[in-house]
Image (tube, helix red, strand yellow):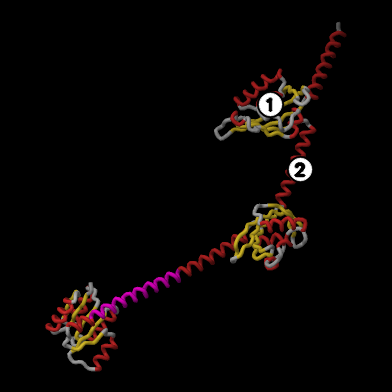
Amino acid sequence: MTHILVVDDEKSIRLTVSEFLKDAGYIVETAEDADEALEILSTTKMDVVVSDIVLPRITGIDLLKSIRNASPNVQVILMTGEPNVETASEAVRAGAFDYLTKPVTKEKITRIVSHACKVKVVDDERRRLEKENKEYQKNLEKLVEERTKSLSESEERFKSLHNASFGGIAIHDKGIILECNLGLSEMTGYSVEELIGMDGLLLIAEKSRSYVMSNIQSGYEKSYEAFGLRKNGDQYPLRLEARNVHYKGKPVRTVEFRDITERKQIEEALRHNEEMILSSQSVANICSYSTNLDVNEIEKSAWVCSPEFYKIFGIDETYPHTIEGWANFIHPDYRKEVFEYHESVVKERKIFNRDYKIIRINDGAERWVHGTGKLEFDEKGNPARMHGAIQDITERKEAEKILLESEQRYRTLSNSSFE
């Protein structure tokens, strides 16, 4: 509902105007002077004030100014019984919505108040939109500031991560480097400035260029190895891994360069050591093995053996790697004994250390072997695997037999000579 305040020190006029407006459907309050009007305005929201210009102590013009300062969206209509140009001009300058001459008619006062109410609605909406717009602008500026700060921080983080990478990173378009990090500069010997705009294939050794170019053209996105080329001409093993991405609105490739020289050296050292171990095993007729002790897994290729294992037992890698398969090459005279001993090793958690005879599968030859094994336990403390070695000791056994026979003959001859 619309609230109207009527201010006039003449009771008859105050009541008449009030009745006109009430009949028009407005909620109306009245005041005798400016002080009473300001008190009402301090506690009650009014839409329109209709006031006489001539009031005791404070004039209607001064009341208008006070209202405009405190509530600029309240529409004020001034009335006067003594109209003149100066008063009208002053009222307009002070911000009056309209200026009426007494006596006022019902038609005129209701029409002007209705117009003032409509203007106030429009004015209130304008003020609301202006306020919302200011809030929006404020929030937008804050958002832009936060986004700018966030982008700046993201850029700093990107640069930090980009340059902290343990490898070289480059973004290229059909081989031409658009961006790169310090890691690539340090790896290749070129400065970042030299790398930007450079054909990235010049960082690849000539023997690998066609291979790398083929992967670029096909959009290959898995890691692969090639040979890199440094600024000083040195070649080095390189692992490359690329992704097809969008950069500044166009499809490009980002690629990581990883110098794997150290890894290759370690692999070579390991390969050399493995060759030495296998060579030593071959000379000593000894092999290593690792077997799963889980009955449920025993059928699943549970044996891991060195090459000499197959030579000692006369089998190849297709031979069944199972308990039954193992039992087949243990000599029947030792089979029960070996299995019982194996069970006691597992049960008592001791070292497997025993000589036994086998029958080589490929040629049926009987051979003596010495087996050793150490248990490995799972997280519950149960035996899980056994690792060990098996050595062909046939020659040693034969030498021991010959030595024993020789000692026996010597004793026989010695005893005969004293008789």
Asked if residue 335 is positioned above or below residue 181 in the image, the reply reads: above
- Picture quadrant of residue 346: top right
Q: Is residue 103 left or right of residue 178?
A: left
Which mark is drawn over residue 111?
A: none
Could you tell me if residue 226 is visible in this image?
Answer: yes
* Left or right side of 80 for 182: right
* Magenta-drawn stretch contains 149: no
Q: Main secondary structure of the magenta part?
A: helix
- SS category of the residue bearing label 2: helix
- Along the viewing direction, whichever of 20 and 344 lies nearer the viewer: 20
Q: Which mark is residue 326?
A: 1
Looking at this view, name the residue that lies furthest to the top.
419
Residue 133 position within the rendered picture, expressed as x and y whole percent measured from the top left: 39, 73
* x and y percentages locating residue 397 in the rendered image: 78, 22
Residue 189 pos. (x, y %): 72, 62
Residue 71 visible in this rendered orientation of the protein: no
Instruction: Answer with mark 2 or mark 1, whichever residue precedes in sequence.
Output: 2
233 versus 278 height, above or below: below
Q: Residue furthest left?
A: 12
Lateral position of residue 306 relative to residue 2, left or right? right
Q: Quadrant of the C terminus?
A: top right
Residue 272's disc is 2
Residue count near mark 2 (Cα–Cα under 10 Å), binned few <14, some 14–19, many ≥20? few
Instruction: Return the residue found at the far front.
Output: 107
Q: Residue at x 71, y 19 (%)?
A: 332
Callout 1: SS: helix
Return the x and y of residue 136 as percentages of the image width and height: 41, 71
Q: Specify the amino acid type for callout 1.
A: Trp
Of residues 218 and 357, the one nearer the viewer is: 218
Which residue is at a point 80% across and 21% down the rendered structure image?
A: 398
For the record, the magenta segment spans: 113-142
Under mark 2, the amino acid is His
